[in-house]
Each structure stands twice: as C-alpha cells, then as structure tokens.
Amino acid sequence: MQSALPLSYKPHIVHVLADDLGWADVGWHREAKDQADVKTPSLDALAASGVRLERFYTHQICSPSRSAIQSGRAPIHVNVQNVLPEVVNPADPIGGYQGIPTNMTGIASVLRGAGYRTRFVGKWDVGMATPMHHPRARGYESWLGYWHHANDYWQQTTGSCGAGTSPRDLWRFDTSTDADGPAVELANGPRCSQHNQSPADETCAFEDAILTDEVVRLISTHNASEPLFLFWAPHLIHMPLQAPRAFVEAFAFIDDERRRLSHAMASLLDHEVARVVAALHERSSPSGLMWDSTLLVFHSDNGGEILFAGLCGGNNWPLTGGKFSNFEGGIRVNAFVTGGAIPAAARNASLDALITAWDWYATFAALAGADPTDNAAAAAGLPPIDSLNMWPLLSGENASAPRTEVVIGETGALTKNGDGQALVGGLIDAEGYKLVLGPEEKLHKVSQYVQTGPSWPNSSSHLVPDVHPKICGRSASTGCLFNVFTDPTERINLAASLTQKFYAMLARVDTHQATVYSPVRGQDDPRACEAVSKQYGGYWGPFVE
C-alpha cells in the first residue's frame, strides 16, 4: 500500500488525454526557426507555467494506453491489443473482450470511494461488449463520448455493419438523470461533412466542440465544495484529418493538405483546452477559484501517426518513428502537469524522471487518500497494479524518482488492430539505456526506424515509414540497445559494444515476459451489429448480456 499525502484538501483533478498528438505538433518541442506552422500558444503557456514531463512514456497505440491509465497497470498486465470493441471470446468471460478485463477496478471507482465526483467526456476505447465494460461499471457517474478508436468528426460514424452502413458512435449516460443510450439529440444532418460545414436547415457541429461544451458544462455546474475527477479524452488529433473551416483557413500558407489539416487540428485542440482552463478560472470554490485547487494533467496517448502515407499528418521530429512503433516517437509523448494544486516552488520546471501513463492511478489515489490496491482483480487471479505515486516528485517534496524502469509492451499480432500474444517489447532503465526487441512472429522487426523532418508531411515527401523496419533480435550482433538520454534519436546502437549490458537487460525482459497477461480477445461477434439495428437505432453500444 502506498501512503497518502497529508493534504489539507483533495484537489480537483482534470485529466486531459490528447489523441495521437506528435512530439513536434506543439510549440514547446519546436525550435524557433521551425515554429511557423505550429500554433499551440495555450498549451505552450500551460506547459511553461507547470511541470513539463520530458520522459513520459505510454504504449505505442490507443486502446492499450487507455487501458493502462484506467487500470493502473503496464500494458503487458492489462492489454497490448488494439482490437475493435466488437470482439468476443465466449470461453473467457473475464478477458475475452477488447480493453480492460471485467474484474479490474478503474481509477474512477477508487476516487469515487474517496468522495470524488467522477465524470468522463470523450473517447472510451477500453471495452464496449458488456455492461461491465461501460464507464458506469468503472466508477464514472456520467459520460458523453464514443466507444471506438475513432469516428467521423461530423457524422459520428465508424465501422461497418454491411450493405454500406456505417453506424454512429456517440453515447450519453448520467446517473443523475438515468440517461444511458445513444446521444441521438446530438446527431448532425445527413449533408454535414468536412466539405459542407454549413448545409442549409441542418445542424452541423464538430464533434470536439460538442465534447468541450460538455466539459465546460460539467465544470460550471459542479458543486466546487466536492472534489471533482474529470477525465477528458478529446478526439483530436486522431484521423480522419478534419477540422472546422476557420481553423483550416488559418493554415492556408501550408501547401501540403495533410500537414495543413493536422496543424489546424492541433490548433483547435489548443483552443479547446483554453476554453476548459478559462472555465476553471471562472468557477468559484470555497478556497477561491476552482483553478486554484485543480491539478490539470495533459498528455498524449501515443506518438503522432506517420504511418499511413496520404492519410495522416502527425510529426514526432526529431524522434524516431511514431504510433505503432516502440521507437521513441511512438511511446515518448508530450506531457505536463499544471494548476493551482502544484506548489508554487515546483512550477516553471522540467522533469527528466521516468514517468508512465499508468502511474496516474497511484498518484491520484494518494491525492485522494485512497488505497489503490485492487482486491477485485486479485480475487480473479489478475495482475496487480504497476502504478507508482509520482506526487512527491511532481510537487517538489522529494527529488528522488520512484520509477527505475519502463517496461515496453508489444504484440505478436500480425495486423495493426489484430489479436496476438502479449509480449515485452523492451525496457528502459534509470540510466537511459533502452533495449528494443522485435517479436519473433515478425522476424524480430520493429517498425518505423525513420525520422521525418521539422516540416512533415510535405508535398515532396515520399516516405512510407512501415517499409523501414529495424531488426532488433536477441543476440548482441542483431540486437538494439540505445541510450536515449544521450542519444534520443536512437541512432547509436550499443548492443555489440555493451554486450554485458545488453544481455542483462534481455534477461530482465524475459523475467517480465513470464508475468504477462495474454488472454485471447476473440473474434468479431455478429451480436454487435444486431444490437446496432435492433436495440440502438443505428448506433454502437453494448451487445452481450
């Protein structure tokens, strides 16, 4: 059990989880000469005024990162697969679904037990199949958002149920009103699209504007004498590349459409975060303004997506690779904490300590004075949490970094969103040494051993990152060992020259491999589409009793 902090109050916690935001998609990771096409002034100011987390690590893809945050576990102990929420394995009623196993306790349940009001807005992506995968079952009192990896920003559609039909994906539930079902009242008109944003006599609202409106509403109506845990997961800046016309036109000077849209989306994300911060500044609480007693956490779920040529516009320069890769561009992400809950002496700082997305679980529990131990998971034979309390470090109370290694997750799945064996894909230690290991199923290849450039993508770029893998095997002659403290772009392979270090870290990987949680997630279940047509009027939703 980790000791709770002796706080005189429980701070409000606002956790902002951006989607696919690349390392170079924000101003504070750009050199001045490369900032012309990046406009994130609000995020830059918040990062500068708080504590920048410069070695913050996630998983390489969406659902595992989100599963790790909500459950407090390294992905290897909860989920390394990015399968769709329609999958079911009837033989495993605990782990035979997408996302978090049914018997793991979510962070919102821990905080709710400590007196917090718990709200979720935005992308869920940690399970949909059963009522036990619902945000309600994970401790949230309300939710407005979508179940899948992504949807269309204008039509809220995703996936297919045959015959050219693409169901909508937007759900609302609230324990105070008994609402729990498709958010049909927020559907746009049929002609609303990226290319027709003002159809006559039709509603046409951008999805993230809808989500931010909900976040602002929750803040403005919250009883500020009660601690609030608000988890906000914007759609931005995940594909498809779409944005309101005014934001796109602000980047008309960028010739490449992918980069123009991507930077418009990052600018819009900046704008939406500013709206929420303003709401916290405007809302009064017993101790002053709500902002004065708020801890705001901001980070991306993984690196920017550079993989699909012609479809994506993320950029992680100068880091190597991006989303779907275990090189730094895929798992080292933009992150900071700020707000009045950060002691004044700790602000305007940068931390190089190893911190992971799954460390928020124990950190938030400590702030709430709650025990993070997951007894329900233990009773079901599931792995315990891996989360470490980072608050003494973040608050400046203790300069010692509690985390001494980061275990990197990987999958043996041969397709991007397929099912496969849960694997340890590497390790980063406290000295900055990083061992990367490619799956045997993929001939030890680790994808995207490439760098882009400060202005990428561009009209002259023909880079297809996935055709540039690197062999990272189990011998010193084929292995991949870097020191990311001194070589953040992973260009200097030390495996052959530091063989003792390489094999020591490989042995450590094998030790972790013996602990992985690797259920068979299952196959697409036809009941998902049956529920779309028979229960939910063309919307996705839970489909297993």
Image (tube, rainbow, N blue to C red):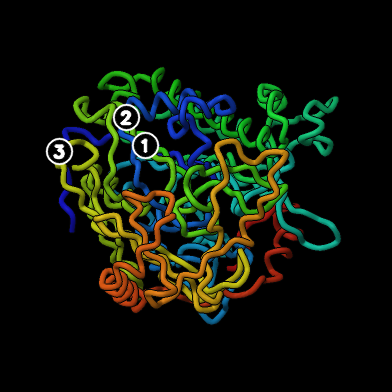
Callout 1–callout 2 Cβ contact below 8 Å: yes
Residue 544: % across, % down: 60, 68
Pointer 2: what residue? 50
Q: Which residue lies furthest to the bottom in this view?
A: 91
What is the secondary structure assignment of the residue under circle 3?
loop
Give SS at disc 1: strand
Going 32% across and 47% down the picture, which residue do you hit?
111
Q: Contact (CB < 8 A) between labels 3 and 2? A: no
Q: Which of 537 and 291 is in front in this view?
A: 291
Quarter of the image with the N terminus is bottom left
Q: Which of marks 3 and 2 is nearer the N terminus?
A: 2
Name the residue beneath numbered marker 1. 336
Q: Residue at left 25%, top 36%? A: 10
Secondary structure found at label 2: loop
Q: Distance between the residues labelled 1 and 2?
A: 7 Å
Rendered location of residue 501, percent (x, y): 27, 69
Identify the residue at horizontal 42%, vertical 54% (top origin). Answer: 490
Specify the quadrant that holds the C terminus: bottom right
In this figure, which residue is indicated by the disc labeled 3? 397
